[in-house]
Image (spheres, grey):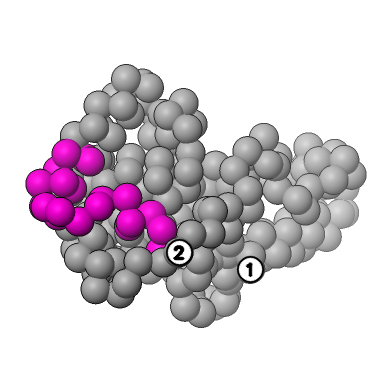
Amino acid sequence: MATERAISPGRTGVPWKGRTAASTTTATALGRVGDGRGAAVRAADEAEYVEYVTHALPGLRRIAHLLCHDAHRADDIVQAALTRLYVHWRRARVADDIDRYVRAILVRSFLNERRLNWTARVRLTGAPAETPGVPATSAPDVETRTVVRTALGRVPPKQRAVLVLRFLCDLPVAEVAGVLGCSEGTVKSQTAHGLARLRTLLGDTDPAVWSKE
């Protein structure tokens, strides 16, 4: 049965706030079933997953929408990412930076969406929200945002992913390279090409405003 799950990333570079020394120790023991406590361990594992997902969905949906420029595809990409996160939750929950880990899953789901084949689906609820960690700025007008979003949707997928991670998620080059599994030089060149493409499409409109929504 599909379960309602929902999510919002925390600050970049900060481990999941729900993790404690005790929970980290518990995570090491997950999967060691057979001593009669297996069901309880799985229940705790599930509860932690749901807790994290409950806080991260709005930000993930917003990132996905900027990546694919289509609400339905964005939901599919987030669903695929959450399914993968569920499967690998025991690894994710002890990652140094769980938000980075989840962003990497999301972006790879976007880049590989045509090859994905999943059956487990998570019913998403709530509207996309502002992504925590992005500095508050004066919002551009709706018409300008629409123009920039449309142009971003015409940027090649890999360049688009780099732009979203660099300017929406405010990640440094090294971290974007880690998320995408490529070199820092590739990130820099993709950023330059992506911005050049945006400038060509936008003319006099400042491409930076898309990151200020």
Could you give the CA–CA distance between mark 2 and mark 1, rounded to whole angstroms? 28 Å
Residue 54 higher or lower than 182, as above or below: below
Label number found at residue 120 = none
Q: Position of residue 209 (x, y in %)?
A: 33, 56
Q: Is residue 97 left or right of residue 32?
A: left
Q: Residue at x 48, y 38 (%)?
A: 171
Give the residue type at disc 1.
Answer: Thr
Q: Is residue 13 left or right of residue 41?
A: left
How many C-alpha atoms fall within 10 Å of the one at disc 1: few (<14), some, or many (≥20)? some
Q: Residue at x 37, y 22 (%)?
A: 184
Q: Is residue 175 left or right of residue 91?
A: left
Q: Residue at x 22, y 46 (%)?
A: 157
Look at the image and tell me whether residue 113 can be seen.
no
Question: Between residues 43 and 81, which one lies in front from this camera angle?
Answer: 81
How many C-alpha atoms fall within 10 Å of the one at disc 2: few (<14), some, or many (≥20)? few
Helix, strand or loop status at disc 1 = helix
Give the label, 2 or 1, closer to the camera.
2
Q: Which residue is mark 2?
A: 138
Q: Position of residue 130 (x, y in %)?
A: 50, 66
Residue 37 higher or lower than 139, as above or below: above
Question: Between residues 189 and 103, which one lies in front from this camera angle?
Answer: 189
Look at the image and tell me whether residue 158 can be seen.
yes
Q: Quadrant of the C terminus?
A: bottom left
In the image, residue 201 lies in the stretch drawn in magenta: yes
Question: Between residues 143 and 22, which one lies in front from this camera angle?
Answer: 143
Helix, strand or loop status at disc 2 = loop
Q: Position of residue 95 (x, y in %)?
A: 65, 37
Label number found at residue 54 = 1
In the image, residue 29 lies in the stretch drawn in magenta: no
Q: Residue at x 27, y 46 (%)?
A: 160
Q: Which residues are magenta?
A: 194-213
